Image (tube, rainbow, N blue to C red):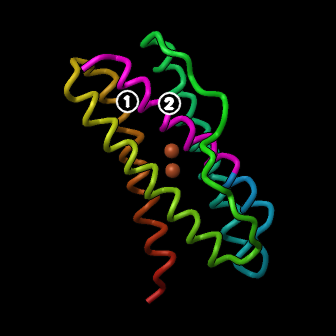
């Protein structure tokens, strides 16, 4: 297993984080109705978390001798002001993040990179927490 594979997968994760920053910022500003009171701060928190994740992944890529991507993942960010739609698109994004980090952990596990494994695992676990929270929010009863 070469660092190249790991760097490639980390860049995929970084692209999704950069997309998440934009998406959550957009929904935080645009969500309408009474649910805005709770969802706007929630999306802001997710935005900040994505920035933090992007920073960790970016620096790890550099440490491995790679060049971090500067563009977000091209998966469309759909404009909506409807709170249910914003939640479903958030759920989709967190599921994708969890999937990419799971694949990345598998790659790093095969290499001998314990420190890197630990920091990526922390990110992976926080994606899982967000995913579970969103699932509870989306299914009210
Ligand atoms: Fe993240
Ligand atoms: Fe996330």
- Mark number for residue 11? 2
Query: Which of the two residues, 132 or 67, is positioned nearer the viewer here?
Result: 67
Indicate whether residue 7 is drawn in magenta. Answer: yes
The label nearer to you, 1 versus 2, is 2
Q: Position of residue 92 (x, y in %)?
A: 50, 63
Residue annotated with mark 1? 119
Q: Residue at x 37, y 33 (%)?
A: 120
Indicate whether residue 26 is drawn in magenta. Answer: no
Find residue 111 and report its image quarter.
top left
Badge 1 marks a residue whose secondary structure is: helix
Residue 123 shown left or right of residue 108 in the figure: right
Does the beta carbon of the residue at mark 2 sit less than 8 Å from ligand 1?
no
- Provide the residue span drawn in magenta: 1-22
Work out which quarter of the rendered image holds the N terminus and state it: top left
Work out which quarter of the rendered image holds the C terminus and state it: bottom left
Q: Position of residue 117 (x, y in %)?
A: 30, 28
In the rendered image, the vertical position of residue 86 relative to residue 5, given as above or below: below
In the rendered image, the vertical position of residue 49 relative to residue 119, given as above or below: below
């Amino acid at each position: 297993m070469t660092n190249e594979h790991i760097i490639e997968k980390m860049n995929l994760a970084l692209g999704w984080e950069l997309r998440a920053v934009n998406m959550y910022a957009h929904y935080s500003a645009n969500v309408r109705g009474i649910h805005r009171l709770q969802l706007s701060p929630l999306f802001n928190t997710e935005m900040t978390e994505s920035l933090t994740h992007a920073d960790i992944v970016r620096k790890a890529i550099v440490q491995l001798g790679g060049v971090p991507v500067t563009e977000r993942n091209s998966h469309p960010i759909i404009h909506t002001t409807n709170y249910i739609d914003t939640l479903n698109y958030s759920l989709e994004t967190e599921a994708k993040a969890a999937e990419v980090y799971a694949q990345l952990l598998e790659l790093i596990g095969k290499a001998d990179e314990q420190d890197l494994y630990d920091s990526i695992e922390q990110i992976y676990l926080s994606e899982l927490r967000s995913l579970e929270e969103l699932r509870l929010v989306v299914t009210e009863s």
